[in-house]
Amino acid sequence: MNIFFGGTFIRKEELKEAGIRYPIKLEYYKIINEDELVKNNNAKYGIKIVKTEYIENDTNIEDETINYLSNNEQKVDELLNVLKDNEVTPISVNDVISDFSKSTFNL
């Protein structure tokens, strides 16, 4: 089950600096893996990031899902807040998560 956690549009100033002239929206979701937890003893919570680019008369959607991240919902919420506050995109989320040590978030 995907639960909407939060969303944001990348700041116009940042887009302008990068030479991008269209809006980009980022959405963050918490994933609850209830069935898989019971079956495989995997982590219960995961995350999903969706990036939507609104390019003149067209949209481009990119997403990244990490299904089994942690059994600790509070820590996953903290991580999602960090990802949202820093406007982390789907393409960079795996690198960002690997940069956080497990002791930082105790995932």
Image: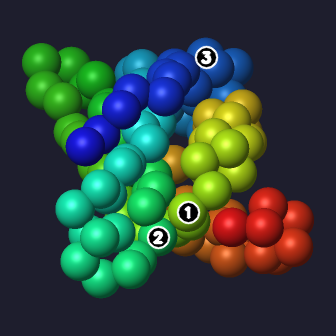
Q: State the separation of the CA atoms marked 2 and 1.
A: 5 Å
Q: Residues within 10 Å of mark 3 (few under 14, many from 20)?
A: some
The answer to whether residue 13 shows anywhere in this view is: yes
Is the C-beta separation of discs 1 and 3 under 8 Å? no
The answer to whether residue 64 shows anywhere in this view is: no
Tell me if 63 is positioned left or right of 68 in this view: left
The residue positioned farthest toward the bottom in the image shown: 40
User: Any mark on residue 12, and which?
Assistant: 3
Q: State the separation of the CA atoms marked 1 and 3.
A: 36 Å
Q: State the separation of the CA atoms marked 2 and 3.
A: 37 Å
Which marked residue is nearer to the observer: mark 2 or mark 3?
2
Q: Name the residue that disc number 2 marks.
A: 43
Tell me if 15 is positioned left or right of 68 in this view: right
Specify which label sits upstream in the sequence, 2 or 1.
2
Q: Looking at numbered disc 2 in the image, what kind of residue is underneath it?
A: Ala
Image x and y of residue 101, in percent:
82, 75
Q: Is residue 82 above or below residue 41?
A: above
Q: Residue at x 55, y 63 (%)?
A: 71
Q: Name the residue that disc number 1 marks.
A: 71
Q: Residue at x 36, y 49 (%)?
A: 32
Tell me if 28 is positioned left or right of 61 in this view: right
